[in-house]
Amino acid sequence: MASALHEYVGGCHCGAIAFSYRTALEVRNWSVRACQCNFCRAHCARTTSDPGGTITFSVCEPELLTRYRFGQGVTDFLICSRCGVYVGATIATDTGTYGIVNLNALKSVPAGIPVPEPMHYDGESKQERLSRREQRWSRAVFVT
């Protein structure tokens, strides 16, 4: 029997960018990561994804969505240009669009979120990074 999907919603402070994260994973089983790059550390980001789940990013005010790229330039970090909240990140590959959400942007934080695991991705090639994200991140879509 398949587990039921649970929905977790979040977004930026001003409401211009929202997300819906759907997963069958129990909260205690989430893979919570704390990337150690300068960007993620500066935002105190805690991110998660589920390869069996989905993320829908709803952009209510498209002119306020900033897609920030740095490093290898393959990932769009989604930031609201009005309130400055980093809500998540996406990549587009030949197999689809994948994403993660920043748990700090959840509207209601569920009990039992695991302590984030510090992650270091230095030394990955562009192809290694894309491949890892295709395997670990959730399928993602945008709606406006």
Image: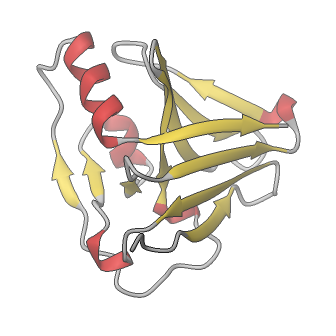
Count of numbered tags:
0
Most foreground residue, 42 or 113: 113
* Residue 102 pos. (x, y %): 48, 54
Q: Is residue 44 left or right of residue 118?
A: right
- Which quarter of the picture shows residue 21? bottom right
> Residue sitting at 87 percent across and 44 percent down?
60
> Residue sitting at 18 percent across and 12 percent down?
125
Q: Residue furthest front?
A: 1
- What colour scheme has been applied to the protein in the rendered image? secondary structure
Q: Is residue 109 left or right of residue 57?
A: left
- Which quarter of the picture shows residue 82? top right
Q: Is residue 121 left or right of residue 142?
A: left
> Residue sitting at 34 percent across and 30 percent down?
134
| Image vertical order of residue 109 relative to residue 66, above or below | below
Q: Residue furthest bottom?
A: 111
> Residue sitting at 35 percent across and 17 percent down?
71
* Residue 36 pos. (x, y %): 23, 43
Q: Is residue 49 left or right of residue 99?
A: left
Quadrant placement of the C terminus: top right
Most foreground residue, 88 or 55: 55
- Which quarter of the picture shows residue 9? bottom right
| Image vertical order of residue 48 relative to residue 100, above or below | below
* Residue 110 pos. (x, y %): 48, 82
Quadrant placement of the N terminus: bottom left
* Residue 49 pos. (x, y %): 40, 52
